[in-house]
Amino acid sequence: MKSFVLSFLFVCVVALPVGAEENSVRVGSDRLGEWIPLLEGRRVALAVNQTSRMSETHTFLADTLLARGVRIVALFAPEHGLQGDSDAGEIVENRGDTYRGVPVYSLYGQAKKPSSKQLRDVDILLFDMQDVGVRFYTYISTMFYLMQACAEADIPMWVLDRPNPCDYVDGPVLEEGLHSFVGTLPLPVLHGLTVGELAWMIKGENWGGTAGLDLTIVPVTGWKHGDAYSLPVKPSPNLPNDKAIAFYPSLCFFEATQVSVGRGTYMPFQVVGYPDPSFGDFSFTPVSLPGFDKNPLQCNKVCYGIDLRDSIPPKGITLRYLFRFFQLLGCRSDFFSSPLFFDKLMGTSQVRQGMLEGKSEIEIRTTWQEALAAYRILRGKYLLYPDNRGDL
């Protein structure tokens, strides 16, 4: 089977001079005129959510294609659902839903991978979702399982690429034994790839038996690694703005503790607190908040801590906030309300164990540098966009 990057025509996958065409960013779906003629007469499935919109018109990709006569036979939705309004971790089962008469299948219920029956009438599958560049952000897990399913069913898959808004390489590389839906691939916490580049890596490394997949990547133009990119649509309920996205890789580990990161407020992943007045002068109260979180941690309790909305996010990840609250809670093991989940998010048990042993952040960071250096070399093989930043 083949693998392609679509520039102005199909060519063998190479690192093209993407981004030289114009100054404004055009995501893969925006390049409609170049690829939509290739869908004529084909039965198309879309893996999409609320982020799958055209840049200029903000029109949902499915609506755009239907209006142009494309025959869409199935829609596949990831965590948070097709509209992006389900809570984090909320199971979305298949209920026979349709969108404009097209069946909608959830890939965040009992099944995380489409069945052969759901793919039976599909000639080609298009993936178009906005990722945030973090290993435990589950849209890339959904993409991985879709790639597996398409490889097994001999169905071509296209990835309509989008920029990475949190474009760094940092954190522990996922270790054996800690695989889960928040960690399906041997990546660091911040993988420094677009979804197109990651798809190419998955196929190139034959992860999940995907080497035979007929893969096409429709690249972004007007963007390169290191360029800032502000998301036009929030990618999930609790990442409402650029600041939340930037702090998310460092603060998400609190999800395995009793410390709140502002779910149930309009400041998620921008504030950190615990129901103890000695933890800080800043306070907030998580409440059930439709559109953000209906059942947040520490619901209806006043939490005290820190406000990061005016702070400069780290260029990568930092453990300083974890250390601060770990020390405020007495450096006890019960700081980790779910030790295994913490390790799965981190991708290793060495961070939690190091904290309990009294090691510093610098000492803990050294434990992941060797694997991270090897990953950087691997990443270099699959870059589709220039990256002249040196050692990230």
Image (cartoon, rainbow, N blue to C red):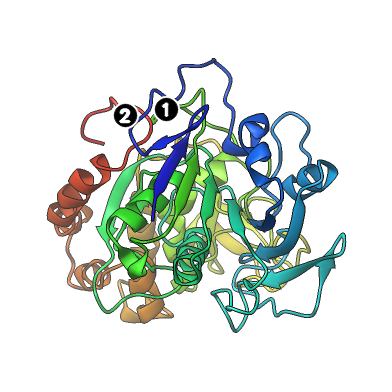
The quadrant in which residue 29 appears is top right
Could one spot residue 232 in this view of the protein? no
User: From what the image shows, is residue 17 above or below residue 86?
Assistant: above
Between marks 2 and 1, how big is the CA–CA gap? Answer: 7 Å
Which x, y percent locates residue 284? 65, 57
Quick check: 348 left or right of 224?
left
Which x, y percent locates residue 146? 51, 65
Circles 2 and 1: CB atoms closer than 8 Å: yes
Total residue callouts:
2
Query: Which residue corresponds to mark 1?
Result: 224
Q: Secondary structure at mark 2?
A: loop
Which x, y percent locates residue 218? 52, 39
Q: Amino acid at mark 1?
A: Lys
Q: Which mark is residue 104?
A: none
Along the line of sight, the residue nearer the viewer: 276 or 212: 212
Assess disc 2: are there few (<14), some (14-19) or many (≥20) residues with their C-alpha within 10 Å of its C-alpha: few
> Mark 2 or mark 1, which has the lower sequence index?
1
Q: Residue at x 28, y 65 (%)?
A: 174
Which x, y percent locates residue 324? 36, 58
Q: Amino acid at mark 2?
A: Asp
Q: Which mark is residue 387?
A: 2
Q: Secondary structure at mark 1?
A: loop
Q: Quadrant of the N terminus?
A: bottom left
